[in-house]
Structures are given as C-alpha cells and as structure tokens.
Amino acid sequence: MDSDISQAYTPGIFRRLAALFYDLLLLCGVLMIAVTFLIVPYELIAGTPFPYDEHFYRLGLRLYLVTMIALFFIFFWVHGGQTLGMRTWRLRLVREDGSSLKAGDALTRLVWATLCLAPAGAGLLWMLFDRDRLTCYDRFSHTKPIRVQD
C-alpha cells in the first residue's frame, strides 16, 4: 500500500470518536433491519408474537445481533479498510506493515477493541499517552488507522 507506512499520519482522538459515532448510528439502522428480518418471518410463520420473555429466544436474539455487529465491522475492514464512518472522516485501517486487513486481522481487532473499550473507553484513552498515538487495541491487533489524503 503506502511505501512508508511509518510516515502515515495517525488520526487523533476527535477524528476517531467522530467516525465511531457515525458508525454506531449506521449500525443502529443495520440492527433494526436485521431484527425485522428475523422477527417478522418468525411471527408470520409461528402465528404468535416473538417470545422475548423466554431465555432461549432472548439468548438467540443476542447472539444474532452480536454476529451482525461483527459482520458489519469485519466486512468493511476487510473490503477497503474503511467503514462508512471511517470513509466520511478519511480514516483507513491497515496492518502494521501497511497491507490490507484480512478477516483474521479484523476479527482480532474487533475482539481487542471490545475488551479494551468496555472499561469506560480506557482502550481509546490509551492513545493520549502512546508515543505513536495508537490505542491498546491497535497495538494488540497489530493494526493501525491512518489518515487518507485527498
């Protein structure tokens, strides 16, 4: 990709938060559509409302939604290195060597980001103290966001 990835501009916290917020708005729409495509056919076929109060169905619905979230990020990160929010804010994910992410890289990044962001966004705040402005999940997954130039 880039001839010298070490010289690529690493975006700051505001740009990353803006892209994340934009992606979360889009993801809400994707999840609403995903739930509709699951619940409506169930209710039409079964002839009864979806049993939200039953543990098995709630667990299944949660697993389905987590899968949809993972597929959303992994698909975009593998196909072009950008989610729609990242494209808007001119960010792209690459591996440490500057090459494109593969599915395993994207999954690793998603797992680390989930674990690192869970405690009040501590994983993102890490970049304020990192010499290369990388988050801990950037480091652990061996990926990094770069600023895409016009």
Image (cartoon, grey):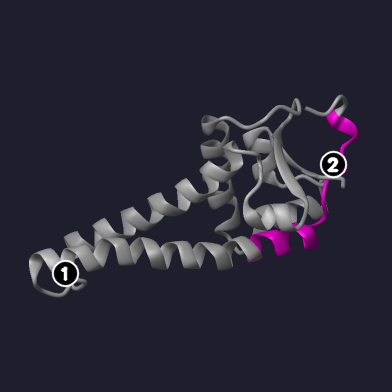
Q: Magenta region: which residues?
A: 5-21
Residue identified by numbered label 2: 132
Mark 2 or 1: the one toward you: 1
Q: Residue at x 88, y 26 (%)?
A: 4
Amino acid at dot 2: Asp
Q: Is residue 99 above or below residue 77?
A: above
Residue identified by numbered label 1: 43
* Residue 129 vs residue 104, the one in the foreground: 104
Amino acid at dot 1: Glu
Q: Residue at x 67, y 30 (%)?
A: 100
> For this view, does 66 lie left or right of residue 141?
left
Residue 128: image x %, image y %? 81, 55
* Residue 99 vs residue 62, the one in the foreground: 99
User: Which secondary structure class fits the magenta region best?
Assistant: helix
Question: Is 146 colored magenta in this rendering?
Answer: no
Instruction: Give the mark nearest the N terminus, 2 or 1.
Output: 1
Q: Secondary structure at mark 2?
A: loop
Q: Residue at x 57, y 32 (%)?
A: 105
Question: Is 9 colored magenta in this rendering?
Answer: yes
